Image (tube, rainbow, N blue to C red):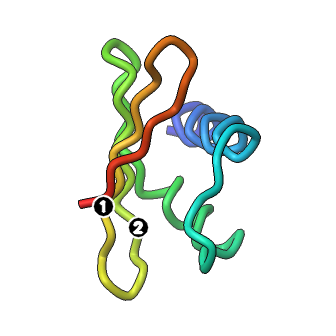
Amino acid sequence: MKLLEDNVRNVLLDMEEHMELHDDWTNEDIMDASRRTKISIYDYVYTIDSLLDDGLVILLENVKQQWTVTSI
């Protein structure tokens, strides 16, 4: 499980270099999200279910090293 959390954290850090997360996200929000993340290595789809006020769910897709974000 620790390895999974480390992988997710690395994904989030990599994303920060290429895109802006929600302006009101704090480092604590991001770490909370990473601890609750379900990750699929095979299809490169990362689902983050963060415990922000509105229970935001974000789908992250790595398509040719370009990150796209879809909020639901």
x then y, percent, for residue 26: 68, 75
Q: SS of the residue at dot 1?
A: strand
Q: Would residue 59 be found to the left or right of residue 6 on screen?
A: left
> Does dot 2 land on a helix, a strand or a loop?
loop
From what the image shows, is residue 41 above or below residue 14?
above
User: Foreground mark, 2 or 1?
Assistant: 1
Q: Position of residue 11 (x, y in %)?
A: 61, 35
Q: Could you tell me how far apart the alpha carbons at marks 2 and 1 are, in whole angstroms?
A: 6 Å
Q: Are marks 2 and 1 in contact (CB under 8 Å)?
A: yes
Counting labels gives 2
* Residue 36 picture quarter: bottom left
Pick whichever, 60 or 31, lies toward us: 60
Residue under pointer 2:
50
Residue at horizontal 60 percent and vertical 80 percent from the top: 24
Query: Residue 38, percent across and down?
Result: 35, 42
Placement of 52 over or under 22, stated as above or below = below
Q: Which disc is residue 57 wearing?
A: 1
Q: How crowded is mark 1: few (under 14 residues within 10 Å), some or many (20 or more)?
A: some
- The relative height of residue 55 versus residue 65 in the rendered view (above or below) is below
Vertical side of 36 occupied by 55: above or below:
below
Looking at the rendered structure, the kind of residue marked 2 is Ser
